[in-house]
Amino acid sequence: MGVSHCAVCGATLDDAGFVQEYWVGDDRQFLCWCAACGAMSTVVLTAAVVSHEPEH
């Protein structure tokens, strides 16, 4: 599993973009550049997500 779509515009990165995978600790990080919208972003796949439920 990796990154196949732009996090900003949703375009497919397979043909029109650049994705480089690297690791920081247990987290998989992807540096992404999208040719369709020109956005550069980092997508992080973490080993675990710790969050809270906001009050309703």
Image: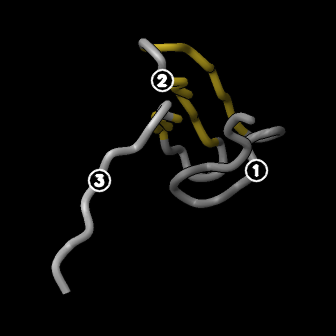
x, y percentage for residue 45? 53, 35
Q: In which quadrant of the rendered image does the C terminus lie?
A: bottom left
Q: Secondary structure at mark 2?
A: strand
The local crowd at label 3, few if under 14, some if 14 to 19, many if 20 or more residues have their Cα within 10 Å, is: few
The residue that mark 3 highlights is 51
Amino acid marked by disc 1:
Thr
Query: In which quarter of the view is residue 54 placed?
Result: bottom left
Q: Name the foreground residue: 4 vs 55.
A: 55
**Which residue sits at x=16%, y=79%?**
55
**Which residue sits at x=54%, y=24%?**
28
Q: In this rendering, is residue 16 above or below 37?
A: above
The local crowd at label 1, few if under 14, some if 14 to 19, many if 20 or more residues have their Cα within 10 Å, is: some
* Left/right of residue 28 with respect to residue 55 in the rendered view: right
Seen as rendered, the residue at the extreme left is 55
The residue that mark 1 highlights is 12
Q: In this rendering, is residue 40 above or below 28?
A: below
